[in-house]
Amino acid sequence: MAEWAHLEINVDDDGNVEVSGYNADPERLVEGAETWEELISTLGGSGWEMVQVVPGPETTYWFKRQL
């Protein structure tokens, strides 16, 4: 059975970002990213697949990657 890593990025209307994850090291993933837009765009090149975006006052981006 495949094992997955999950990453959740929350961005509020003021541009504040919160990153959390399961089977992932969120701090390592955000290193070097100047903006949340840059972070999201570079995740695809690192093997992360965007699963869902939930817009609102706090937009949530969910990613997954097979380990």
Image (cartoon, grey):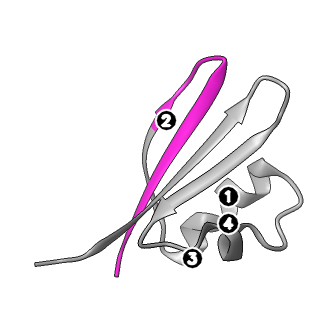
State left or right for residue 5 relative to residue 62. Answer: left
Secondary structure beneath label 3: helix
State left or right for residue 29 relative to residue 52. Answer: right
Residue bearing the label numbered 1: 41
- Decide: is 2 above or below 36: below
Residue shown at 70% from the left, 36% from the top? 11
Q: Which amino acid does label 4 sit on?
A: Thr
Question: Badge 3 local density, few (<14 within 10 Å), some, or many (20+)?
Answer: few
Mark earlier in primary sequence (2, 3): 3
Do the residues bearing badges 2 and 3 touch, measured as CB atoms within 8 Å? no
Q: What residue type is labelled 2?
A: Val
* The residue stretch that appears in magenta: 53-67
Q: What residue type is labelled 3?
A: Ser
Secondary structure beneath label 1: helix
- Decide: is 28 above or below 64: below
Q: Residue 42 carries which label?
A: 4
Residue bearing the label numbered 3: 46
